């Protein structure tokens, strides 16, 4: 089986290569990042400064050349745009946001429905898929992929300005321990009361959507969830987070979830491995004391 895959995020392509390259011969298209060569692709085409029009044209040409059985596009903003264009160009139906793919007579895929409350498992003859970030833990191989620079055609787009995002703890996607805060923390100033725990555990600080987007106590790139980052830490500590499905969609890959919430009926207690019912401002200092001793 042959697969062709694309991502403009090196982290996502490493995960996708780890996940797919055992069962398939993979050709990948990625932004330039030499490290991507260690994750099992047969060949990688590196591109620079592409847009959805010239990247999708390049992918279409590679489809004609390689004749892949499957095409996997990472579900980033650019990736989703490219998948739509490819679906039309190749006349292929696209199944979006898959987080599981099994080969058989037909392909069996899984994706979340209703913001992560339900899993939809489908069998299909589709060959085009967008793939959710956080698919697998990326694992390096001993081999190095062949690589080639991909020359893109001129684009119809004109880049007017590139602004760096204001970033906070931007590497939360790679973090082993995450302390995540919700509206229950009450104010930006109260975050200082959480920091001893964050620092002691050498953790990364993240938050729910209201905390990152509405109140801006944290930055946008620290948001976890359906419309934020999907993370896979060893330990995820949720402080004052109710556990709505849109938040849970971001932490399904976490190995251990610990929740502290004063409301014993909060939905987070249905999702966590360890739950403490109580006031986080009493429990966090007690935890810090306990770990100190
Ligand atoms: C399309 C869409 C996409 C979304 N995407 C995301 C997303 O990516 N990420 C995300 O997080 N949300 C997302 N949301 C929003 C989501 O539905 C919830 O509104 C949000 O997750 C709630 O955030 P929260 O848990 O911080 O706040 P709340 O739901 O208000 O929960 C606060 C919790 O804190 C507890 N609490 C209060 N004080 C204390 C205390 N002193 N000690 C202990 N506990 C205390 C309360 O009991 C409560 O359970 C999305 C919504 C939509 C519609």
Image (spheres, grey):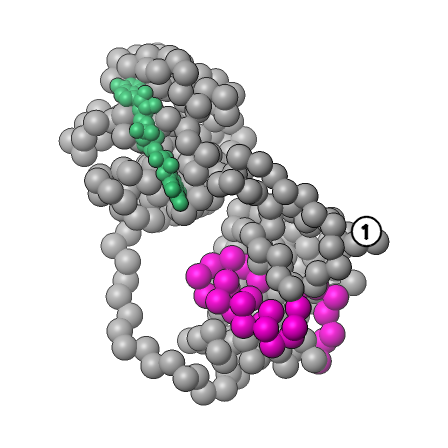
Percent x, y for residue 184?
27, 25
Which portion, as a residue range, is magenta? 65-92
Quadrant (top left/top right/bottom left/bottom right) for the N terminus: bottom right
Residue name at image x 18 percent, y 30 percent: 187
Residue name at image x 33 percent, y 37 percent: 207
Quarter containing ligand 1?
A: top left
15 left or right of 174 in image: right
Task: Give residue 244's quadrant in the image.
Answer: top left
The local crowd at label 1, few if under 14, some if 14 to 19, many if 20 or more residues have their Cα within 10 Å, is: few
Label 1: which residue?
104
102 left or right of 287 in image: right
Foreground of the two, 33 or 209? 209
Residue farthest along the left direction in this orientation:
189
Percent x, y for residue 283?
31, 14
Residue name at image x 54 percent, y 59 percent: 74
Task: Give residue 64's quadrant in the image.
Answer: bottom right
């Amino acid at each position: 089986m042959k697969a062709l895959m694309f991502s403009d995020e090196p982290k996502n392509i490493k995960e996708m290569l780890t996940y797919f390259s055992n069962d398939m011969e993979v050709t990948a298209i990625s932004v330039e990042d030499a490290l991507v060569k260690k994750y099992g692709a047969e060949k990688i085409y590196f591109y620079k400064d592409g847009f959805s029009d010239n990247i999708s044209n390049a992918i279409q040409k590679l489809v004609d050349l390689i004749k892949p059985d499957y095409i996997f596009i990472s579900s980033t903003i650019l990736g989703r745009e490219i998948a739509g264009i490819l679906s039309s160009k190749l006349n292929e139906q696209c199944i979006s946001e898959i987080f599981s793919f099994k080969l058989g007579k037909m392909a069996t895929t899984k994706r979340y429905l209703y913001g992560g409350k339900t899993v939809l498992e489908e069998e299909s003859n589709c060959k085009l898929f967008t793939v959710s970030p956080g698919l697998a833990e990326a694992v390096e191989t001993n081999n190095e992929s062949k690589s080639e620079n991909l020359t893109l055609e001129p684009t119809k787009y004109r880049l007017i300005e590139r602004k760096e995002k204001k970033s906070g703890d931007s590497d939360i996607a790679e973090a082993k321990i995450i302390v995540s805060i919700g509206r229950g923390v009450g104010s930006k100033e109260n975050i200082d009361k959480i920091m001893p725990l964050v620092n002691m555990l050498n953790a990364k600080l993240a938050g729910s959507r209201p905390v990152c987007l509405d109140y801006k106590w944290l930055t946008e790139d620290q948001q976890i969830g359906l419309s934020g980052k999907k993370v896979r830490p060893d330990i995820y500590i949720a402080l004052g987070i109710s556990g709505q499905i849109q938040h849970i969609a971001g932490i399904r890959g976490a190995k251990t979830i610990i929740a502290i919430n004063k409301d014993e009926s909060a939905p987070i207690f249905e999702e966590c491995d360890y739950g403490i019912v109580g006031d986080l401002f009493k429990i966090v200092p007690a935890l810090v004391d306990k770990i100190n001793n």
